[in-house]
């Protein structure tokens, strides 16, 4: 499988200007191609092919005074911009056909977009120098903060400038089969929530860090300072970068937490089962901020690709499975319960069940995993003894009311 490895870049002032030119040229070619296709659609003309657009908007455009500056950047960057437009149209049409979730039509890119990216393939002849710098055509040797070693030779590199003004190099590499982990015995079901980020079927509970909630005070202060700046001023742009950096710190902390927890779960368990949550629906409720702060979708995606990478089994059960309504001990379903009910007693077997642990066990069982509730928070409820066994006294004669009931009076 293919993976992406991202590393921080530290370009010089001249290299930042060269990257800005590359971002701008790629954006112009993308917008020109989108405009040509939209014009053809409105005039009911044949859909322009990528080869035709490349010849018209890149090769011929470089020879005109209006677009002569396109020659200042690598041609591969401009070609990849057309490939990105093809991908946008393909995703849009696949959404209409039901092959993937629906997406909007391709939109024009703006120079005010806070995130910019250009991609270099092997044809661009980029390389990593002996001094461990990233050499890009018509940009130069960029300083890279290597945090780990690449597992194989990368095929492409994407240079990204994020909203906080940081630069990253994203490499696409192929994984090797020797990365598959040795088989292990444990199998677990995971119930994701807000009170606890994850509850495992063996009874373990992982607290939710709530990164956004903890940083709200700092974020509000930065956002308030931004709202007071004059629009279009340099001070407003500086304040915007401060807000973006504050949000980037929160996102980085959340991503690091997801990576560490997902890697730990994949290494410890042979099979992992999760529930397919309706995140979009929950994000429209009063719990929206907490749902977005948890980042369940990103965490589940990490579990899925890491399971495929390391030879583990990943199972996703349906969202309509009644995991919180069924007793994990006897299997009796006694209906839905409000969210404030965190512990309940099964009316059939008398087991006192922790709501989250019970759901995690049911998720594992629904996925067909050999998971028991051993070690989970399950106990028997006290059952009153029959009157005949409630003491050592001899059995008393029936009262007159009991005699009347026996006689049917």
Image: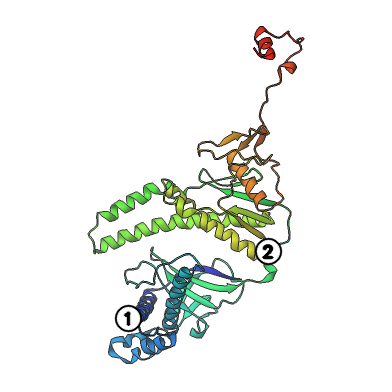
Q: Nearer the viewer, residue 292 or 214?
A: 292
Q: Nearer the viewer, residue 254 or 285?
A: 285
Residue 193 visible in image: yes
Q: Name the residue beneath numbered marker 1.
A: 39
- Which residue is painted at 43% across and 67% down in the image? 103
Looking at the rendered image, the quarter that the C terminus falls into is top right
Residue 379, x across and y down, in percent:
67, 33
N-term mark: 2 or 1: 1
Quadrant of residue 272 within the rendered picture: bottom right
78 relative to 205 in the view: left or right: left
Residue 121, x across and y down, in percent:
50, 81
Above/below status of 161 relative to 36: above
Q: Indicate which disc residue 311 carries.
A: 2
Q: Badge 1: how crowded within 10 Å, few (<14), some, or many (20+)?
A: few
341 relative to 367 in the view: left or right: left
Residue 7, x across and y down, in percent:
50, 68
Circle 2 SS class: loop
Residue 372, x across and y down, in percent:
71, 45
């Amino acid at each position: 499988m293919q993976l992406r490895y991202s590393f921080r870049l530290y370009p010089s002032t001249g290299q930042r200007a060269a990257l800005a030119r590359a971002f701008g040229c790629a954006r112009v070619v993308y917008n020109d191609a989108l405009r040509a296709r939209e014009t053809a659609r409105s005039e009911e003309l044949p859909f322009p092919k990528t080869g035709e657009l490349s010849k018209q908007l890149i090769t011929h455009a470089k020879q005109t005074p209006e677009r002569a500056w396109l020659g200042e950047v690598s041609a591969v960057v401009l070609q990849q911009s057309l490939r990105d437009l093809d991908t946008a149209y393909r995703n849009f049409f696949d959404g209409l056909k039901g092959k993937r979730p629906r997406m909007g039509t391709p939109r024009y890119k703006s120079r005010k977009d806070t995130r910019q990216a250009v991609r270099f393939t092997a044809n661009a002849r980029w390389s990593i120098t002996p001094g461990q710098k990233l050499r890009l055509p018509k940009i130069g040797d960029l300083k890279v903060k290597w945090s780990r070693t690449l597992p194989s030779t990368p095929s492409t590199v994407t240079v990204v400038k994020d909203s906080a003004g940081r630069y990253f190099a994203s490499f696409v590499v192929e994984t090797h089969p020797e990365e598959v982990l040795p088989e292990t015995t444990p199998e677990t079901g995971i119930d994701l929530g807000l009170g606890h980020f994850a509850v495992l079927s063996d009874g373990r509970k992982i607290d939710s860090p709530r990164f956004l909630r903890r940083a709200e005070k700092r974020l509000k202060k930065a956002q308030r300072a931004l709202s007071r700046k004059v629009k279009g001023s340099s001070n407003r742009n500086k304040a915007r970068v401060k807000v973006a950096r504050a949000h980037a710190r929160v996102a980085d902390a959340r991503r690091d937490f997801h990576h560490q927890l997902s890697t730990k779960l994949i290494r410890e368990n042979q099979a992992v089962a999760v529930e397919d949550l309706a995140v979009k629906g929950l994000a429209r409720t009063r719990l929206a901020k907490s749902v977005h702060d948890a980042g369940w979708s990103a965490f589940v995606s990490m579990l899925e690709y890491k399971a495929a990478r390391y030879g583990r089994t990943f199972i996703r059960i349906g969202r309509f499975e009644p995991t919180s309504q069924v007793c994990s001990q006897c299997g009796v379903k006694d209906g839905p319960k409000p969210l404030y009910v965190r512990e309940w007693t099964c009316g059939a077997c008398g087991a006192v069940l922790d709501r989250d642990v019970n759901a995690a066990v049911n998720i594992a069982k629904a996925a067909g995993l050999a998971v028991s509730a051993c070690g989970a928070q399950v106990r028997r409820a006290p059952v009153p003894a029959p009157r005949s066994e409630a003491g050592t006294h001899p059995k008393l004669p029936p009262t007159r009311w009991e005699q009347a009931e026996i006689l049917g009076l």
